[in-house]
Amino acid sequence: MEHKQAVAIRIKELMKEKDFTEETLANATGLPTTRIKKTINCEYQAIKLDRVFVICRAFKISLLEFFSVPIFDEVDC
């Protein structure tokens, strides 16, 4: 699995857990809704860490909490 796929899966999990829509997440991060959609649909070659950081802040979790789930054990390096 590519890292961008794992990130997208994790964001979707957190959106469901925190009852966020794409629009809610966009508003909470200040990122355009189109960027959120492209990120969770893996339409970028890669996702920047600063974008993940902003998303984590919106979910009120740390980067460590974001990446400390089994899905990232399946990422190809």
Image (cartoon, rainbow, N blue to C red):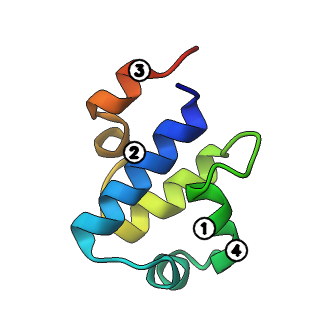
For disc 2, the neighbor class at 10 Å (few under 14, some 14 to 19, many from 20) is some
Q: Who comes first in sequence, dot 1 or dot 2?
A: 1
Instruction: Kindly identify the residue that appears in the image at 45 percent across and 84 percent down.
Output: 24
Instruction: Kindly identify the residue that appears in the image at 39 percent across and 28 percent down.
Output: 72
Instruction: Kindly identify the residue that appears in the image at 52 percent across and 62 percent down.
Output: 54
Given residues 60 and 23, the one toward you in this image is 23
- In the displayed structure, 53 sits above or below 25; it is above
Check disc 2 and report its element: helix, strand or loop: helix
Q: Residue 36 carries which label?
A: 1
Q: Residue 63 carries which label?
A: 2
> On the image, numbered disc 4 is attached to which residue?
34
Cα distance in 3D space between marks 1 and 2: 18 Å
Mark 2: amino acid: Leu
Cα distance in 3D space between marks 3 and 4: 27 Å
Mark 4: amino acid: Thr
Q: Who comes first in sequence, dot 3 or dot 4?
A: 4
Mark 3: amino acid: Glu
Instruction: Kindly identify the residue that appears in the image at 42 percent across and 79 percent down.
Output: 21
